[in-house]
């Protein structure tokens, strides 16, 4: 008896272990368990075992999610419960075909939980409850592997955990980051269905069509806000139709007809999703946005498709990479007339790079080769978007992305991730602000330069030097305020069709956007503009004397460069004259590529200045003197 009494605490501990484990499990773990049990229900050999696993999944849903769903999203709750009922009925038949159909319904059981998670995150924000927000965020964090794949979003979550008062600020950024995924997935799943039709695999095509529908259901409330109830409902109808088309394979519809119908639906879906993103519905705007999306998917899929030795490690990811690379080139070819009209040179350059990407993927080239080529192609796409005017270039999108990156940098810095903060600010400038510089410079050159200096120079230097979090936060708030002013200026004042007028990457480190050179050579991707950028960033900005020179130079340069750039765009002859005048200077600047130390930058810099003074002032003056002397003789 005494032994039993002694063992009682141990036995109690063992009995409590499941309860402790359940208490420690997050909502993300519960979602993962629902997914696993639903998957195991399909794998089970006997219908009774399938029903038992399905019952476990349903119990998890009812224990962890149902009460919140019934209160805040009864529509999604009904969808989920109907899906459980449908799956149960299908497993009860014992028919293998019904069992495969039940597997498709798994997409409803697990993906609809994302919708509830997002809804409850919004509820928590409205209640200013950071703990509740973080609890519900575990669903999307788990699903999209935020801890492993998205350091910026992870920094935002961590910053909220450390300082709940930041919930209202950072939750907006997290929402947009998550919606980016749902927007992409809505279109991507239909693209993948088409890939499966090309392989004559109609069952897998159904799986992707089902996934697309349930991904969109999470996006639907936000689409209502952005494009209105009518268009959002039309988008939902298209996704339901895509599912119905995939189901029609059971009725003997040919693969060619399935492909044709799915392509037609995907085209309309993509158009509405782009409109939700603020992209104008013109052919060139939609084409460029479509190419950019597929380049992003090439990068995402190829990383998981092959290993470091060029061996395929995931057949599906590899097939998707091939399809997305080919899809990007196909869109370019289909829109040659409108895209070539923006810039024939950029069109040809983009065509070459996309073609090379296809070849590289076919040859299983190193991951870095494909990713770098996709980056180069994306830069050209952005440049062409700038050339389509405000609507095509989606200026609102660039402003929004910069704000998100700056706030993410603020969050990263607040948790001690200074390297990540620096990287995010650099991305805000290099990959986004450079495409706003030209439009802003047209209406307010001094504001454009102020934002550039405060972001590229001041903020990055503050991060490098370890400034206090309060100083970093204040600097970011100032920049965001200026960006709001700039946004109002470029969206209310008509601007000329802005080709990537110098606002390009030349403004990257500590100089400014080279408006004159970009206008002269037609693109910030031109080799001549790249040379100027590299010398500025790699030589001048890395030394004290070089930085001082660029600061003084910019003060003078921005007083006249926007007007010169405008004149170049208006007069082809003047543009050629400027290009001719720049050629000797570019030749002498190549000397600076060898400068590394402070003394080398100073010495070679003075030599370059002397050479240019000689060429542009000395030689003409000498010629004038000679002419005067010859006349006297």
Image: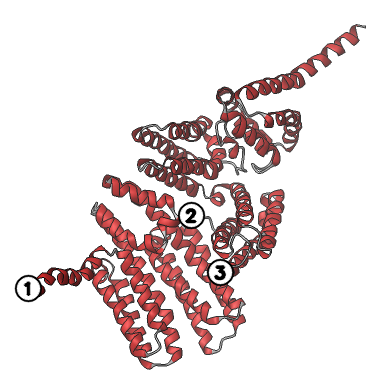
| Sequence-first tag of 2 and 3 | 2
- Image point (77%, 16%), residue name: 618
Q: Which residue is mark 3?
A: 314
Q: Secondary structure at mark 3?
A: loop
Q: Residue at x 26, y 71 (%)?
A: 66
Q: Secondary structure at mark 1?
A: helix
Quadrant containing the N terminus in the rendered view: bottom left
Q: Residue at x 53, y 63 (%)?
A: 271
Mark 2: which secondary structure?
loop
How many residues crowd around disc 3 within 10 Å: few (fewer than 14), some, or many (20 or more)? some
| Classed neighbour count for the residue bearing mark 1: other residues with Cα under 10 Å, few (<14), some (14–19), many (≥20) | few
Q: Is residue 591 left or right of residue 99?
A: right
Tell me if 242 is positioned left or right of 628 in this view. Answer: left
Q: Which quarter of the rendered picture does the C terminus lie within?
A: top right
Question: What residue sits right under mark 2 in the picture?
Answer: 278
Residue beneath disc 1: 2
Q: Position of residue 147 (x, y in %)?
A: 40, 56
Measure how far apart labels 2 and 3 are at the Cα level: 35 Å
Residue 419 place in picture, x, y as percent: 45, 41
Looking at the image, tell me whether mark 1 or mark 2 is earlier in sequence order. 1
Q: Where's residue 579, x and y in %?
A: 73, 34
Taking the image as shown, residue 483 lies to the left or right of residue 560, namely: left
Q: Is residue 269 visible?
A: no
Q: Nearer the viewer, mark 3 or mark 1?
A: 1
Residue 70 sits in which quadrant?
bottom left
Q: Residue pushed farthest right?
A: 633
| Mark before the other along the chain sequence, 3 or 1 | 1
């Amino acid at each position: 008896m005494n032994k039993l009494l002694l063992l009682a605490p141990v036995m109690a501990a063992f009995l409590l272990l499941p309860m402790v484990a359940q208490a420690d499990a997050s909502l993300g773990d519960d979602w993962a368990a629902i997914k696993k049990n639903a998957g195991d229900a399909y794998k089970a050999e006997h219908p009774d075992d399938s029903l038992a696993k399905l019952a476990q999944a349903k119990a998890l849903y009812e224990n962890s999610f149902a009460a919140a769903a019934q209160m805040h999203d009864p529509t999604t709750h009904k969808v989920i419960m109907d899906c459980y009922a449908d799956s149960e009925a299908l497993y009860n038949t014992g028919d293998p075909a019904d069992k495969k159909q039940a597997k498709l319904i798994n997409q409803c059981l697990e993906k609809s939980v994302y919708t509830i998670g997002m809804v409850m995150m919004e509820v928590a924000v409205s209640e200013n409850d950071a703990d509740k927000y973080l609890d519900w965020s575990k669903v999307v964090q788990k699903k999209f592997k935020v801890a492993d794949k998205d350091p910026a979003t992870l920094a935002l979550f961590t910053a909220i955990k450390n300082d709940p008062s930041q919930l209202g600020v950072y939750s907006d950024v997290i929402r947009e980051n998550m919606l980016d995924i749902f927007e992409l997935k809505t279109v991507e799943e239909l693209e993948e269905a088409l890939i499966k039709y090309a392989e004559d695999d109609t069952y897998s095509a159904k799986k992707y069509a089902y996934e697309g529908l349930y991904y969109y259901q999470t996006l639907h409330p936000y689409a209502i806000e952005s494009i209105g109830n009518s268009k959002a409902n039309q988008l939902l109808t298209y996704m339901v139709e895509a599912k119905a088309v995939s189901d029609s394979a059971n009725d003997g519809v040919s693969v060619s007809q399935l492909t044709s119908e799915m392509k037609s639906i995907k085209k309309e879906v993509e158009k509405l999703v782009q409109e939700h993103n603020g992209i104008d519905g013109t052919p060139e705007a939609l084409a460029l946005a479509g190419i950019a999306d597929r380049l992003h998917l090439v990068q995402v899929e190829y990383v998981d498709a092959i290993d470091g030795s060029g061996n395929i490690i995931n057949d599906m990811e590899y097939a998707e990479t091939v399809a997305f690379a080919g899809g990007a080139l196909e869109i370019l070819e289909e829109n040659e007339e409108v895209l070539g009209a923006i810039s024939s040179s950029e069109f040809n350059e983009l065509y070459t790079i996309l073609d090379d990407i296809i070849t590289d993927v076919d040859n299983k080239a190193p991951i870095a080769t494909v990713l770098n080529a996709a980056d180069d192609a994306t830069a050209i796409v952005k440049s062409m978007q700038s050339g389509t005017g405000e609507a095509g270039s989606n200026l609102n999108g660039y402003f929004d992305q910069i704000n998100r990156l700056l706030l993410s940098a603020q969050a990263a810095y607040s948790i001690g991730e200074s390297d990540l903060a620096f990287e995010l600010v650099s991305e805000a400038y290099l990959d986004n602000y450079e495409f706003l510089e030209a439009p802003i410079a047209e209406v307010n050159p001094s504001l454009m330069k102020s934002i550039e200096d405060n972001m590229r120079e001041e903020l990055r230097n503050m991060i490098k030097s370890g400034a206090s979090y309060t100083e970093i936060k204040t600097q970011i708030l100032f920049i965001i305020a200026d960006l709001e002013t700039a946004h109002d200026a470029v969206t209310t004042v008509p601007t000329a069709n802005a080709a990537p007028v110098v606002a390009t990457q030349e403004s990257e480190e500590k100089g400014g956007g080279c408006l004159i050179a970009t206008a002269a050579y037609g693109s910030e991707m031109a080799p001549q503009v790249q040379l100027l950028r590299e010398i500025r960033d790699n030589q001048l900005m890395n030394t004290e004397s070089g930085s001082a020179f660029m600061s003084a130079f910019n003060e003078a340069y921005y007083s006249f460069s926007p007007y010169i750039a405008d004149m170049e765009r208006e007069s082809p002859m003047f543009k050629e004259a400027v290009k001719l005048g720049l050629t000797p200077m570019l030749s002498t600047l190549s000397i600076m590529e060898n400068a590394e130390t402070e003394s080398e930058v100073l010495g070679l810099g003075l030599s370059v200045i002397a050479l240019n003074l000689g060429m542009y002032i000395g030689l003409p003056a000498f010629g004038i003197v000679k002419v005067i002397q010859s006349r006297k003789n």
